[in-house]
Amino acid sequence: MKKSIFKSITGRLLILLLMLSMIFSTGVFAAVDSNSNESSNDPTIDTQATSDIGVQYRGHVQNKGDVPLPVGNFVTGPNELGSRSEGLRLEGLRIELTGAVPSGAGISYQVHVQNKGWMDAVQNGDFAGTTGEGLRIEAIKISLTGLDGYEVYYRGHVQNKGNIPAVDNTWGWVKNGAELGTTGENLRLESIEIKIVKTETYTALGDSIAYGMSATPGSGYVNLFYNDLIGVSGNEDLTLVNLGVPGYTSSQLLTQLQNDPATIAALSKAKVITVSVGGNNILAPVIVTLAAAFQLDPASPTFPTDLATALAQPGAQDIITAALPTIQTNVTASVTQFGTDWPQIVATIKTLAPQADIYVTTLYDPINTQDPLFAIFDPAIQTINAAIETPGAGYKVADVYTAFATYQGSEPLVNFNWYTGNLDPHPTNAGHELIYQSHLNAVAIN
């Protein structure tokens, strides 16, 4: 009886590896190669908290002179400078940044003036426009300089047009050097409001599931969660940065966090972060072990085809049977490595993005509980999930494992199906929808 079960496991593993090698190995080993620990990049992680940067401004208005009073005071953004009900022209203004402004950063602005056209741009509190000439400002452009991670937004009131710009029948904003006002229409700019907005991201980290592999474009859980986030007040300008890489293990994610400048930059602006990693800690050692057993080079560009050919040869099942103990040992070692990497991953994310809300997914098991392979893979999955579900870790857990295990719907959650010959374990669109719902229901483990 035991021999029969063992043959069943070996046979199914043979088929599974044949398919998985074609689906995943290129991504797994490309990721390994591109994230070698020999990287020469070692950028310093800036842990210094920076207070919010703001803006203030004052100006010269027809019949009023310098405003606000007393002379020399400023309006704090985004409050109004000028008037909207008195029909008075804005003739000149000064704009400057406030707060912990980094060295070399500033604000530049350029005005279009009656009879003069576009005047030279000025910056950081210098005067733009005219006084004593009775000339109206008709348009303005405002930009930030040397201030990565922030944007400048502005809007105003124009003679005969009212509040501009109009966006979806409401008073909107222009930003970052766009023209506000009119040229060639002889209309005065009567008031202006300015604000500085910190650029914020939703940054997705992890492997092929975060990347959205096998999902219809736009239907991955990352996109679904992003669409939900930007519908929340205060998140309207949130930018999505998906840094998921197919094939990534926990060690490769840690290397990415410590060494990749684009990742470090994205996390420095992150308001929300999601992490999905660990599946390749189970898959990669299986494929590496089989590569050694069949004397193949996993770094070769033809490796997927080479492994598929080897697995189809007579005697392949005996080689897999002989390799099963090594596979188990290597999977165990890789899962143990996850336990070592995980606290460092979390600590690095928190250092790079100390104010961000962090969501972490547990791994689901794509194999049916009645399948002989369930007993091989599920304990490894559970071990990784136990590390993720550490009490008091300071993030929310999206319990995807339980959501998949208790799912009662009719639509399949994963592409994996022995009977149809589809052994891709990635989520279907329905699976991604359930992962997304798990994020909405995510809770901190106490």
Image: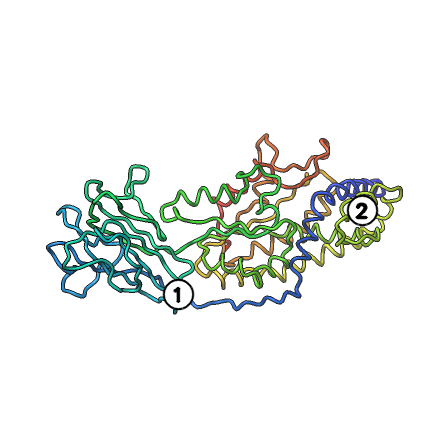
Q: Are marks 2 and 1 in contact (CB under 8 Å)?
A: no
Total residue callouts: 2
* Mark 2, residue position: 306
Q: Where, by quadrant of the figure, is residue 390 drawn?
A: bottom right
The outermost residue toward the right is: 314
Q: Residue 40 at x, y = what percent?
A: 62, 67
Task: Residue at 23% x, 49% y: name it.
Answer: 138
From the image, state whether disc 2 or disc 1 is nearer to you: 2
Instruction: Give, as a three-letter code, the residue at label 1.
Output: Thr
Distance between mark 2 and mark 1 Cα atoms: 53 Å
Give the number of the disc on residue 50.
1
Q: Residue 24 at x, y = what percent?
A: 69, 46
Give the number of the disc on residue 94.
none
- Crowding near the residue tagged with mark 1, few <14, some 14–19, many ≥20 C-alpha atoms within 10 Å: few
**In this picture, residue 249 sits left or right of residue 348:** right
Task: Residue at 59% x, 59% y: name it.
Answer: 256
Task: Residue at 50% x, 45% y: name it.
Answer: 439
Q: SS of the residue at dot 1?
A: loop
Q: Where, by quadrant of the figure, is residue 67 drawn?
A: bottom left
Instruction: Give, as a three-letter code, the residue at label 2.
Output: Asp
**Residue 433 visible in the current orientation:** no
Q: Residue 81 at x, y = what percent?
A: 21, 54
Of the image marks 2 and 1, the number of the one nearer the N terminus: 1
Q: Residue 400 at x, y = what percent?
A: 57, 44
**Residue 278 visible in the current orientation:** yes
Colour scheme of the rendered structure: rainbow
**In this picture, residue 148 sits left or right of residue 53:** right
Q: SS of the residue at dot 2?
A: helix
- Crowding near the residue tagged with mark 2, few <14, some 14–19, many ≥20 C-alpha atoms within 10 Å: some
